[in-house]
Amino acid sequence: MKARLAAMDEAMMVVSTGHGAAGMNFVDVLLKRGFAVVVLVHSEEEGEQLQSLGAVTVRYIQEMADRNQLPLEFVVKSAFVFENSLPQCCQDIELCRSLCPQQLYVVSNNRAPVGLVYKGLGATYVIHSRSGDVSFLV
């Protein structure tokens, strides 16, 4: 039990919106590099896809919004939100901020100047990437 808790102390949180390849690839990179990963998802189908990658802890966004906290064994230092739509991304940022990650990254492929909106909601960094490859952040 103690080993499990120690591993979760370094957990990364990824909010994967939709079934985009960028979020899935990033989770895969984190797992291959040995990080404990907590993924917040919007649907059961998305959760099943992510669990097929391996040792991923999946939580549903609706559950987190209702409780407004992660279970105590999770200490999240960084969160990564993959943008799907502006309204959904804004809600995801607010949820992540309420869960208190120290660093909140938003990965956007949107060419519109949405960075200021996301930063105003609490994003630490907004990464604009057409490919969605942000493995350099690890």
Image (cartoon, rainbow, N blue to C red):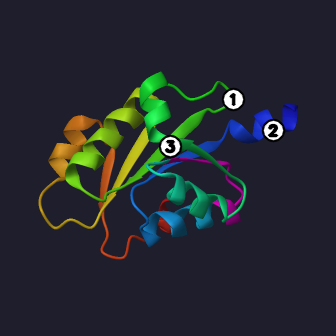
Residue 52 position within the rendered picture, expressed as x and y whole percent measured from the top left: 67, 64
Q: Where the C terminus falls, by quadrant?
A: bottom right
State the residue position of label 2: 4
Q: Is residue 47 visible?
A: yes
| Left or right: 51 in relation to 128 | right
Residue 59 position within the rendered picture, expressed as x and y whole percent measured from the top left: 56, 41
Q: Are marks 2 and 1 in contact (CB under 8 Å)?
A: yes
State the residue position of label 3: 78
State the residue position of label 1: 73
Residue extent of the magenta highlight: 31-40
Point out the frontmost of discs 3 and 1. Answer: 1
Disc with the residue nearer the chain's start (3 vs 1): 1
State yes or no: residue 49 in magenta.
no
The vertical placement of 52 against 99, above or below, is: below
Badge 1 local density, few (<14 within 10 Å), some, or many (20+)?
few
Residue type marked 1: Glu
Q: Residue at x 45, y 72 (%)?
A: 21
Residue type marked 2: Arg
